[in-house]
Image: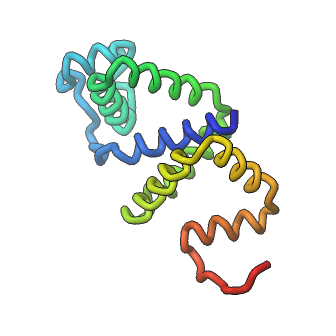
Amino acid sequence: MRHRHIVATLSIAVWLASAAAIADDGVDWDSLTEEQQTALAQFADRWNEISPERQERLALGAERWSTMTPAQRDAAAQRFRMWRELSDDRRQLIRDRYEIYRDLPRAEQDRIRRNYQRFRQLRNDRRQELRRRFHDMTPEQRKRVRDRLTDRRPRTTTRD
């Protein structure tokens, strides 16, 4: 289950990272394509009551949805169901971490995505072993690993 949360978190972060800048005025319903309006039909009656930021996110999501294959749509729907099942606290934590991610320089974002892709390419047993080792670490050890991975502080040559 923990693996699913990590995958959902990263999928959402990558999807959100690809979103364009949000317009101050929002999105006019009539400016949406027919496909977007169909995907967003449940919001039609109250579209003007939705914040401009959310209108933009919904419009981008509907546009992306319209270009997906049926398999991609199924996977996206599954990720959305997993997102909805998360507690409010967990979703807020993910949003907070996304804000941190979004504020990183592009090169750092790219490095994080590459590291994630390398992790995903590992054999399942190796991923589980790395997760177990990380889980078994003390908070101080985890912080050192994070610091080393993000190059946020100078590396030392001494070993613990």
Which colour scheme appears in the figure?
Answer: rainbow
Question: Horizontal placement of 70 versus 117: left or right?
Answer: left
**Left or right relative to 160: residue 1:** left
* Quadrant for the C terminus in the image: bottom right
Query: Which picture quadrant has residue 64?
Result: top left
Could you tell me residue 106's position as x and y percent? 37, 62
User: In this picture, is 125 found above or below 141?
Assistant: above
Q: Quadrant of the N terminus?
A: top right
Residue placed most toward the observer, 38 or 157: 157
| Residue 137 horizontal side relative to residue 99, left or right | right
Q: Quadrant of residue 46?
A: top left
x, y percent for residue 32: 21, 24
Q: Residue at x 61, y 71 (%)?
A: 148
Q: Residue at x 22, y 28 (%)?
A: 28
92 sits left or right of 59 in the view:
right
Determine whether 141 is above or below 78 in the image: below
Between 52 and 91, the one nearer to me in the picture: 91
Q: How many marks?
A: 0
Q: Residue at x 81, y 55 (%)?
A: 136
The spot of residue 134 in percent (x, y) is 73, 55
Q: Position of residue 145 (x, y in %)?
A: 67, 66
Point 59% across, 78% down: residue: 153
